[in-house]
Image: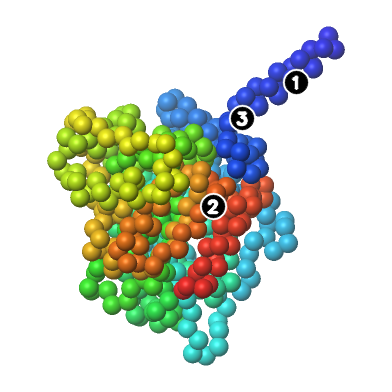
Amino acid sequence: MRLLPVVVTVSLTVAVAYYVYIPLPDAIQEPWKLMILDSGFQTMMHLASLKAWLGFGNYIESVRQSIEGFEGMMKGLHSSEPGGGVMPGVKVSDITFVGVPVRVYEPPAGGEGHLRRGLMFFHGGGWAFGSAKKGSYDVINRMLSDELNTVVVSVEYRLYPEVHFPVPYLDCLAAAKHFLSPEVLANYAIDPERVAVSGDSAGGNLAAAVAQEISIDDTTSVKFSVQALIYPVLQALDFNTPSYLQNQYVPILYRSLTIRFWLQYLGADLSLESQLMVNNHSSLHDSNITPELRARLDWTTLLSPKYQKNYKPLIVKKGSQGAAKVPGLLDVRAAPLLAGPEVLAKCPRAYILTCEYDVLRDDGLMYARRLQDAGVTVTNDHYEDGFHGCFSLINWPFEFDVGKRALRGYLNWLKNNL
C-alpha cells in the first residue's frame, strides 16, 4: 500500500510533464518557463472551446475572461512589490477621441515652453484580445511616458467577434487623425515634429496601415515622424514563408492560430483554415493577384539567404474557389506589405523589431526591405533568441531576459529617433 502514493505521484508528474513539454529551439532561454506559459494559454483555449461546445457562452468571451482573471491575479502580486509598476509622476486618463476609447499617459509637466514627444500605440492580440488598459501594455506605456517625456495615447479599438475588418483599422485611423490635429497636439504640449505611431503584432499591422494612410492623406497637415513596429503581421497571402514553416509549432503564436486570427479578422469562414495552410487561396489561377502584387511578398528576393535556408516557395497553380473569396486579402489596409512603392516612399522612418523564432519574422523582414528599397530609413532589431510575444513578457513570474532587452532596445531607439 505504501507504494500506491508513489505510483500516483509519479504518474501525475509524468502526465503534467507530457502536457506541458514541447520541443523548443536550443537558442530560446528559460524554455520551461515558456512551456508553462504556453500550456496555460492552451488550457484557456481548450476550456473555452469546451464551454462553447456545451453552449455556455462565446469562445472568445470565455478566453477574454480567463485572461482578465489571470492579469488581475498578476496585478495583485505586483501591487505588493515596491512601486507596483506605477510611475507616480505619470497622469493617466481614460477618455475618447472622436468616439474611440483611449487611455492617455501624460508625463510630469516640464518647464514653460518645453514641448514633449507624442506616441500613439495599438495593442496586439489577434484583433480579438488585449486591452490598452491592462497587463504589460499599461506598464510599458507608463514607462515610455515617464522615461521619454512622452504623451502616449493607447487606443481601445473594437475587437472580434463584435466587429470585423475594416472597423478596427477605421477606429485606429480616426483616433490617429484626431491626435495629429494641431489643436490636440497643442493641448497636450506635443511637438508636431516628434509624433510616433507604434504597435505590436496585430497592433503593428494597424500601426503600419495607419502610417501609410496618414502619409498619403493631403488633408492631414501633421504626419507621424516615425513608426515603431513590433513583430508586425503584414500579409495573409503566403502562410508558407520560411518563418511560418520553421516556427509553426513554436509558442506562443502557432501558424494555425495565426490563420484563424486572419479568418476571424476578415470575416471569413473558419473552415477555410486548411485551404490557407497550403496557400490554395493565393493560387496562380487567381487573376486578381497580379505578378506585381506577388513580387511585393516574394521572400526569395526580399529575404537574405540566412533566413531562406533550404525552404522552397509553395506556389499553387489552381487552388480552391471558395478560399479565393476571403474578403480583404488584397486590401492594403489589412495587408500593409502589399502597398505600392509610391506609398512606401512617403512613409516615416521605421523601427521594426523581429524575432528569429516567430512565424511573423519574415513579414517584418520583408517590410523592412521594401521600405528601404523605397528610400525609407529603417532600423531592424532582430533577436536571435526571441519568440513571438516576448516584448510583453517583462513581469514576474513570466519575465524573460529577451523581453527586457527588446523593450529596452525599443525605448532607446525612440529616445534617439523621436
In the rendered image, the residue lying farthest to the left is 287
Separation (CA) of disc 1 from disc 2: 39 Å
Which residue is disc 1 drawn over?
A: 9
Which residue is disc 2 drawn over?
A: 383
Residue 288 point in image, percent of width and height: 16, 43
The amino acid sitting under disc 2 is Tyr
The residue sitting at 64% across, 44% down in the picture is 29
Q: Secondary structure beneath disc 2?
A: strand
The answer to whether residue 106 of the structure is visible from this angle is no
The amino acid sitting under disc 3 is Tyr
The amino acid sitting under disc 1 is Thr
From the viewer's perspective, is residue 232 above or below residue 215?
above
Separation (CA) of disc 2 from disc 3: 24 Å
The residue sitting at 39% across, 79% down in the picture is 192
Name which quarter of the figure residue 147 lies in.
bottom right
Q: Could you tell me if the residues under marks 2 and 3 are in contact, i.e. CB atoms within 8 Å?
A: no
Front-most of residues 195 and 285: 285
Q: Secondary structure beneath disc 1?
A: helix
Which residue is disc 3 drawn over?
A: 21
